[in-house]
Image: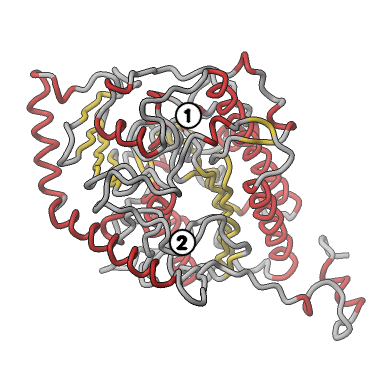
Amino acid sequence: MAPNILFIMADQMAAPLLPLHDPASPILMPHLQALAAKGVVFDSAYCNSPLCAPSRFSLVSGQLPSRIGAFDNAADFPADVPTYAHYLRRLGYRTALSGKMHFCGPDQLHGFEERLTSDIYPADYGWAVNWDEPDVRPSWYHNMASVLQAGPCVRSNQLDFDEEVMFRARQYLYDHVRNTPEQPFCLTVSMTHPHDPYTIPDEFWGLYQDAEVRLPRVELAQDQQDVHSQRLLKVIDLWDKTLPAEAIRRARRAYFGACSYIDANIGKLVDTLAKCGLADNTIIVFSGDHGDMLGERGLWYKMHWFEMAARVPLVVHAPQAFAARRVAASVSTIDLLPTLVELAGGLIEPGLALDGRSLLPHLQGSLGHDEVIGEYMAEGSTTPLLMIRRGPYKFIYSSQDPALLFNLASDPDELDNLARHPAHQSLLKSFLDEVAQRWDLPALHQRVLASQRQRRFVAGALSRGRRTGWDHQPMVDAGQQYMRNHMDLDDLERRARFPCV
């Protein structure tokens, strides 16, 4: 029987901070650690664009942002782009999404047979970036309120969302085992924590004391930052300003608590699989869309290629199929589509565009690829900001900024820019030549500009008159819920009970 697939996603979870990768981490995540102990852990996994929507569009499609027009958080995701949900559905899987995927545009399913919840963010073009006015800071940009207001809460918008995500996901598993146990499923459970705002209930806030929360390792004066970082400081309204240490510590403490909240939900999902008898035939994949700088280098949120913003957790738990191991090679979330298709017993369709490469060799303990390609074209950028990660090196390039080149093996904090060193000019040239070969940057710049202009125009028009939203509306037929008079009571109770008696 084909394996079930449970794909769990966190939002804005910085891999370098997690106990998964840092033995000294104070963050408590026992359920994820238990999965990792019997799974395959990727120690150098990255997103392909450090922002929610572009990263997610690339993840579900296995294609780089520039190929599918995933330029920013208001990019239209075309309905004709194949996703892993399309592939698995063709293989006979039930495909469902509970939670966030930040789909923009009128298609809100993209191959998923069911979406169990709405999304937490809007599906329209209102957040389109504007390279025509790079110095204008729109009101919807991140600011520092999330940091300055950090602390415990009883309830928040994020909690409302994730509690629904979890309820619907677990109910889906209960319904599956009662109604369609013979058909394999691929259930994606995508929560919004630990994404800011940095607030979490006392249950998780209280797991940490201020003394246990480390302040950022690296502090840089704003005038010592790279050019893109300086732009980001203006984007988040922190330029020429400072944050009190107490606010930084409280934001990080709440973030730690939110990571533990995600872990508790992982535990609930694993427990549900076990109680439903699904654990032995379900592959569990855990990952995320990007990280969070959390004050490192004076930066917050994401939008850059530094490790805290770009690295994501990635664990594949399938102990019946793969021995526990750790993978040091660099991989990315565009590699998930071909991997999930192969794990489901399928093949990639010839002739369809695909940038990702299967992780199966890594899972099996043989040699696999060691390369990540990244593209960023959203807030704070003024032209495409590219990244190549291979071996020990990370190369970050924009045609308008000085290049950045780091050896992460000897410089994990990314402080020594080798692009300025005479001894590394040959290596720098090889990366520059590769950029010229991989991308037509003037043409890509014009594509991004054209897309931004079109979407801003359409958004302006659609804001007038009667509004018709694209936000997903999960429909529930109350006439088919629980007990109704067209149902036989004994038959209903028999079918609804699990295990059967």
Q: Nearer the viewer, residue 274 or 297?
A: 297
Residue 486 placement: quadrant: bottom right
Question: Does the rendering let one see residue 337?
Answer: no
Q: Nearer the viewer, residue 252 or 492?
A: 252
Residue at image x 34%, y 34%?
A: 329
Please give the residue where the numbered disc 1 appears in the rendered image. 294
User: Do labels 2 and 1 touch, CB within 8 Å?
Assistant: no
Q: Amino acid at mark 2?
A: Phe
Residue at image x 50%, y 56%?
A: 101
Residue at image x 27%, y 20%?
A: 224
Furthest residue to the bottom? 486
Q: Nearer the viewer, residue 117 or 202?
A: 202
Label 1 crowd bin: few (<14), some (14–19), many (20+), radius 10 Å: many
Q: Amino acid at mark 1?
A: Leu
Q: Nearer the viewer, residue 99 or 145?
A: 145
Please give the residue where the numbered disc 2 appears in the rendered image. 103
